[in-house]
């Protein structure tokens, strides 16, 4: 049961208790001859008692036949006088006997104002031995005169949340205050959540343009790197929150007082990284700033495909990230094509009013669609998809000693007294389409001293072998191996097997299967 629902039940619980004790006089009633022990709390059956500062909880002693009875709370918390309705929000108005920490009432309502672990203590004394039978049986102890049940209820009280954030620019902490932080367009400001009070567990950073009043960026990260690309004045806000089924909800908002003013960048506006082809044949270019929206611009770009100029159909800033330009051609392009892009420069503008620099004959990195799971076939899951075969004789392990990419690779080592190494991707099947030609690629790292003349890649269970010479592979560096295969109608739920027939140590990584494209 979450704490919001429990709070609703609390008010029902109070009403029930009021009915149970409506006929009980305020003064202590003489005990009967019968002795019994019991209690009830507003926490119901919760395994741990959790609340928050400013909330109240109820505790009721259901014992009978007690000679003496008392409740004790810790200083800083208060007894409340019931009944308390659901509509009551100013609980301090119900405080009774302010400063008292001892009560003889059968039922108490405690307003918790101190954070941290707080204790509510119940002491009952009986003439006869009694025991409380819950998850564990707790028996009263004899003090020489009475049987004493001394019970403490531990309550974890969450403090009110106090959100606190700081800004860093160029790795320097910015002093909080009215002074404006000037940042160059295209740079990032680091926002750090320093909130501790109230034990928050989530947060949200928001950036608002002070002119338009619109929120232009947000981040849930405790350390958020937020780029500022457009000229203007902004302000940052941090909402620090506490959520969960078994903890009380809460939140607080911190406004970073420093305005953030974005000024034009002193850096040239230029191409960054590779020009790449996307899956839908879009050619994407990345820049170190965000573009202003524009129309046209196709005449500024020259695209050469296999030495011939292709017409540019459109060029626009990417909708999801305007630091990128997406270019489309009027003709189809294919994976084997050699494509370059040139840009005349000028005319287009960044949000901070810079013009991008010209560039010539930059190659396009063509899209490659791997039908294999790159984690499993790159061994980044520690080899979960692979197992040594029943007749494997070599030492097989998933190693971090060498990796073409990521952290892991497959290491196979065979000595003279061992049988051949055999390992297959039994837990990572894949299927191929009938009639299509596929490229199989993988990388090998041959350790110096390896004498096996070859390795074999097998397609199972139809036992198609792809033999590969090792003699011509450079030792001590990663080398890519490529082979082709034309699929047939039976190529469903296939797997790979690697075979190391003779002595040596070889690492394998980055298996890749993709459909081969051929320009018509």
Image (cartoon, rainbow, N blue to C red):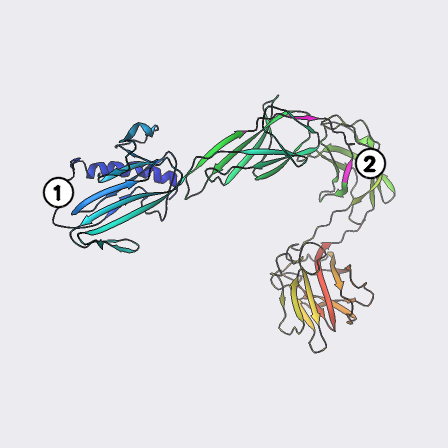
- Image quadrant containing the N terminus: top left
Horizontal and vertical percent for residue 22?
A: 18, 35
Q: Residues within 10 Å of mark 2 (few under 14, many from 20)?
A: some
- Given residues 302 and 195, the one toward you in this image is 195
Horizontal and vertical percent for residue 459?
A: 69, 65
Answer with left or right where residue 383 lies relative to residue 64. Answer: right
- Which residue in the structure is indicated by mark 2? 311
Q: Residue lying at the far top in this picture: please name it.
A: 211
Dominant SS in magenta: loop
| CB contact under 8 Å: marks 2 and 1 | no
Q: Is residue 506 visible?
A: yes
- Residue at 11% x, 49% y is 33
Answer with left or right where residue 246 lies relative to residue 315. Answer: left
Instruction: Residue 457: name its quadrant.
Output: bottom right
Total of numbered circles in the picture? Answer: 2
476 part of magenta stretch? no
- Which residue in the structure is indicated by mark 1? 30
Q: Residues within 10 Å of mark 1 (few under 14, many from 20)?
A: few
Instruction: Residue 212: name its quadrant.
Output: top right
């Amino acid at each position: 049961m979450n704490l919001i629902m429990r709070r609703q039940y609390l008010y029902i619980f109070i009403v029930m208790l009021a009915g149970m004790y409506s006929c009980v006089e305020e003064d202590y009633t003489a005990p009967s001859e019968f002795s019994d022990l019991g209690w009830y709390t507003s926490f119901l059956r919760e395994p741990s008692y959790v609340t928050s500062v400013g909330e109240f909880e109820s505790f009721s002693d259901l014992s009978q036949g007690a000679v003496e009875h008392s409740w004790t709370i810790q200083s800083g918390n208060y007894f409340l006088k019931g009944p308390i309705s659901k509509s009551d929000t100013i609980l301090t108005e119900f405080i009774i006997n302010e400063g008292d920490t001892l009560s003889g009432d059968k039922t108490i309502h405690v307003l918790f104002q101190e954070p941290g672990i707080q204790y509510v203590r119940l002491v009952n004394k009986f003439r006869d031995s009694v025991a409380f039978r819950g998850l564990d049986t707790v028996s009263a102890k004899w003090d020489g005169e009475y049987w004493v049940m001394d019970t403490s209820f531990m309550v974890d009280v969450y403090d009110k949340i106090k959100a606190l954030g700081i800004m860093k620019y160029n790795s320097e902490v910015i002093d909080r205050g009215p002074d404006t932080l000037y940042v160059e367009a295209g740079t990032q400001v680091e926002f750090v959540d320093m909130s501790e009070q109230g034990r928050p567990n989530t947060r949200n950073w928001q950036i608002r343009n002070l002119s338009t009043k619109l929120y232009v960026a947000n981040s849930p990260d405790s350390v958020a790197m937020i780029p500022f690309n457009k000229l203007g004045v902004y302000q940052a806000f941090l909402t620090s929150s506490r959520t969960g089924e078994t903890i009380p909800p809460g939140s607080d908002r911190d406004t970073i007082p420093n305005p953030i003013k974005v000024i034009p960048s002193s850096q040239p506006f230029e191409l960054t990284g590779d020009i790449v082809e996307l899956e839908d044949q879009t050619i994407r270019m990345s820049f170190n700033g965000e573009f202003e929206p524009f129309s046209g611009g196709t005449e500024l770009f020259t695209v050469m495909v296999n030495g011939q100029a292709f017409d540019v159909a459109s060029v626009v800033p990417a909708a999801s990230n305007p630091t990128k330009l997406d270019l489309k051609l009027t003709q189809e392009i294919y994976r084997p094509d050699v494509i370059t892009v040139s840009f005349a420069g000028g005319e287009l503008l960044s949000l901070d009013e810079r013009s991008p620099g010209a560039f010539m004959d930059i190659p396009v990195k063509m899209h490659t669609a791997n039908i294999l799971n790159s984690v499993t076939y790159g061994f980044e899951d520690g080899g979960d998809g692979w197992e040594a075969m029943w007749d494997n004789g070599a030492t097989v392990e998933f190693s971090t000693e060498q990796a073409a990419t990521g952290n892991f690779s497959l290491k196979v080592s065979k000595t003279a007294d061992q049988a051949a190494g055999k390992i297959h991707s039994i837990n990572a099947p894949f299927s191929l389409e009938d009639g299509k030609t596929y490229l199989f690629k993988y990388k090998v790292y041959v350790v110096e001293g390896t004498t096996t003349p070859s390795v074999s890649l097998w397609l199972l269970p139809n036992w198609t072998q792809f033999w590969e010479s090792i003699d011509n592979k450079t030792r001590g560096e990663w080398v890519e191996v490529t082979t082709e295969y034309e699929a047939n109608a039976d190529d469903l739920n296939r797997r790979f097997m690697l075979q190391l027939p003779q002595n040596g140590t070889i690492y394998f990584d980055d298996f890749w299967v993709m459909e081969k494209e051929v320009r018509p």
